Image (cartoon, rainbow, N blue to C red):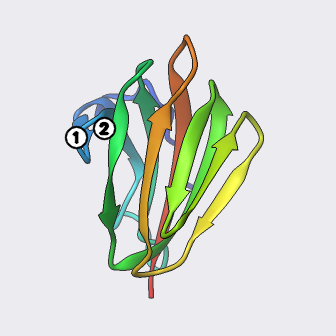
Amino acid sequence: MIVRNIKDKEVMETTYLAHGGAIAQMILDRRILKEIGFLAIAQLAPKRRIEPHIDPMEEIYFIMDGEGEMSLDEETRRVVPGDAIWIPTGSKHGLVNIGHKDCVILVIASPA
C-alpha cells in the first residue's frame, strides 16, 4: 500500500507551474502508477488562468474549492466545488479563477 499526503516531501518536491498559471504538485504519478497517468493537485490564485492547451491524454478536473470558468473546445461554463469536468484526449481546455480565493482542483489523467 502506498499512501501520499499533499504535504509529503515526495509530493512537495514535484511543485511546478502548470500551463502558465496554477501551482501544482504530483500526488501520484508514473513513478508509482501502472495504468493511470497521474493524480495532481493545483491551486489557481484569483484572476490567474491555466492557459488553454491540448494534452495527449484524457483528464478529469475536480473542483475542490473556489470557482472558475472552464473552457473546453468551444464551450465555457462556470464551475464550483464538487464539479467534475471530463476532458477528452485532444480537446483544448483552460480554466480561469473568477472568484476571490484560490481555486483548488484535483487533476486525474490517463493515457489514451
Query: Residue 43 lies in what quarter of the image?
Result: top left
Closest to the observer: 39 or 70?
Answer: 70
Across and down, in percent, residue 55 comes to: 33, 71
Residue 2 visible here: no
| Circle 1 residues within 10 Å: few <14, some 14–19, many ≥20 | few
Instruction: Point out the image quarter for the C terminus.
Output: bottom left
Q: Tell me the residue that label 1 is attached to.
A: 20
Q: Residue at x 62, y 24 (%)?
A: 66
The correct choice, above or below, for 91 with respect to 103 in the image is below
Q: Are marks 2 and 1 in contact (CB under 8 Å)?
A: no
Q: What element does badge 2 sit on?
A: helix
Q: Which mark is residue 10?
A: 2
Instruction: Please state which amino acid type lies under the numbered disc 1.
Output: Gly
Across and down, in percent, residue 54 comes to: 33, 70
The correct choice, above or below, for 50 with respect to 37 in the image is above
Instruction: Point out the image quarter for the N terminus.
Output: bottom right
Closest to the observer: 27 or 16?
Answer: 16
Q: Residue at x 41, y 20 (%)?
A: 45
Instruction: Report, in whole angstroms, how far the alpha carbon at label 2 lies from the one at label 1.
Output: 23 Å
| Circle 2 residues within 10 Å: few <14, some 14–19, many ≥20 | some
Q: Residue at x 56, y 41 (%)?
A: 69
Q: Earlier in the sequence, mark 2 or mark 1?
A: 2
Left or right: where 51 falls relative to 36: left
Instruction: Please state which amino acid type lies under the numbered disc 2.
Output: Glu
Q: What element does badge 1 sit on?
A: loop
